Image (tube, rainbow, N blue to C red):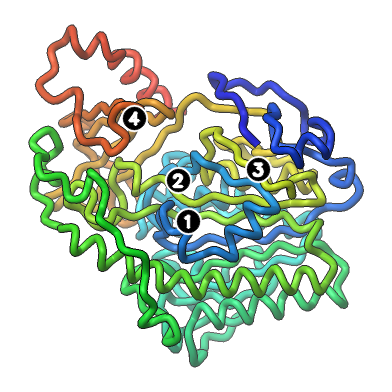
Amino acid sequence: MSTSSTSGSASGPTRRGLLGTAAAVAAGATLPALAASPARAAARPNVLLIVTDDQPKQTEWATPKTVSWLTGQGVRFTNGHVTTPLCAPSRSSVFSGRFAHNHGVRNNGASHALDQHTTLQRYLAQAGYRTGLFGKYLNSWNVADNPPHFEDFALLRPSYVDGTFNVNGTVQTIDGYTTTVVRNRTLAFLEKARTDDRPWFAYVTPYASHGPRTPEPKYAGTDVPAWDGRPSVPEDDRSDKPPYVRNATQTLADGRRVRAEQLRTLRSVDDAVQAFHDKLAALGQLDNTLVIYIGDNGFNWADHGLTGKGVPYRPAHEVPFYLSWPGGGLGGGTTDNRIVANIDIAPTVLDAAGITPDTPHDGRSLLSGYSRDHLLIEWWKQGTGAGQKTWSSYVSKDRQYTEYYDLHTDASGTVTGTGQVGFREYYDLQADPYQLSNSLYQATPAQEKALGVPGLAAALAADRTA
């Protein structure tokens, strides 16, 4: 359901409040927050959290069954983001509800910087949930190390075929396509609900659609819809962009290739999600399972000459984001246009489970009426080599302001450098949704003031230290 955008307000009902009648929800009426139900007070929901790898927003063709279930019987968030468009920092934000500058996992080498006491899985396990992890965990995590606070797990060393897994403490090779292995291990975990009446939490994270993007054999030759790019592909004139973008060389052909490969790998994810749906229906647990689906970051398809992630452009930080929970009043098939992010997942799940956290969150429960007016997105350069600089960005629905800094991190996530701002970008996202014209390029002080840049810079500085 659509929600109004207020400036950081926390208005609206509390976790156990009601937000209108079922008829209003079914009709797709505009309501001030996600619906809640008295059923939430009666039983803690199961939680199925699905996190895909490098899945950009424009990939729904590959996941029709997922979309049919989770948006047809749930909520589609049209402004879903990740706060750091890189795997390990983003996943750590999912677990902790915190920005990377607060949880400390600033790059893919710093996974052990995450305080495991702050994680969603710790709270749920402590509250009596049966917890399971199936698939990728955190980059740079040794596959032989058991993931804390998970009772049942098949932790994957990232790969697509004949993968190395840590299965409940035993490292072994499991033959076959790893998305299928993840699916089957998850189904076995769900099946245990027939004899174990504890609520459960399943964290399911296939390797798709990360490179090398190896499809399941049955999808290897699948035709995908034709794609002629978008205005940002490859953007011939990049003179107003930072040097690493001006020097980018990826073409429309490169973007088409990556897109097709990603879509083919995601077809297997879609099959797995359908299997989860069918299993929950067979178990009679479909209504009281809170399902959340998100990509850990997006991906560029030669936008601005770039393929990949880690950049302050929309394809890299905008992601598919769905939620379904019929038993909690979220089964009507609605849309929500609030600015939401991966940091909101942990607060949402704990809110639904009635758990009050004892560690801080930067995110907010999606079950409340809270609506932010902008979001901090941040990324750190690892090492001292040439190329892209550390950056942070102020992102709202209608504008984005980015600063690049003389800062870098080491493998532990420690930050060094002067912090001096070396380049800035400003985009009017209403008039220029593909971020083609950097309004700060050769701008005068008067033009910067007219754009509101002094205020944006101050807000960004405050966000980076909050």
| Residue count near mark 4 (Cα–Cα under 10 Å), binned few <14, some 14–19, many ≥20 | some
Identify the amino acid type marked 4: Leu
Q: For the residue labelled by badge 2, is the local secondary structure a helix, a strand or a loop?
A: loop
Marks 2/1: CA–CA distance: 8 Å
Marks 3/1: CA–CA distance: 20 Å
Which residue is labeled 2 in the image? 82
**Residue 83 location (% of width, % of height):** 43, 42
Which residue is labeled 4 in the image? 429
Marks 4/2: CA–CA distance: 18 Å
* Marks 2 and 1, the one that precedes in the sequence: 2
* Marks 3 and 4, the one that precedes in the sequence: 3
Mark number, residue 295: 1
Q: For the residue labelled by badge 4, is the local secondary structure a helix, a strand or a loop?
A: loop
Nearer the observer: mark 3 or 1; the answer is 3
Looking at the image, the residue that sits furthest to the right is: 42
* Marks 4 and 2, the one that precedes in the sequence: 2
Q: In the image, what residue occupies the spot 14% across and 38% down?
A: 242
Which residue is labeled 3 in the image? 334
**Given contact means CB atoms under 8 Å apart, are the residues at marks 1 and 4 in contact?**
no
| Residue count near mark 1 (Cα–Cα under 10 Å), binned few <14, some 14–19, many ≥20 | many
* Marks 1 and 4, the one that precedes in the sequence: 1
**Given contact means CB atoms under 8 Å apart, are the residues at marks 2 and 1 in contact?**
yes
**Residue 215 location (% of width, % of height):** 40, 79
**Residue 208 location (% of width, % of height):** 44, 69
- Which of the 4 quarters of the picture holds residue 436? top left
Judge left or right: residue 204 versus residue 329: left
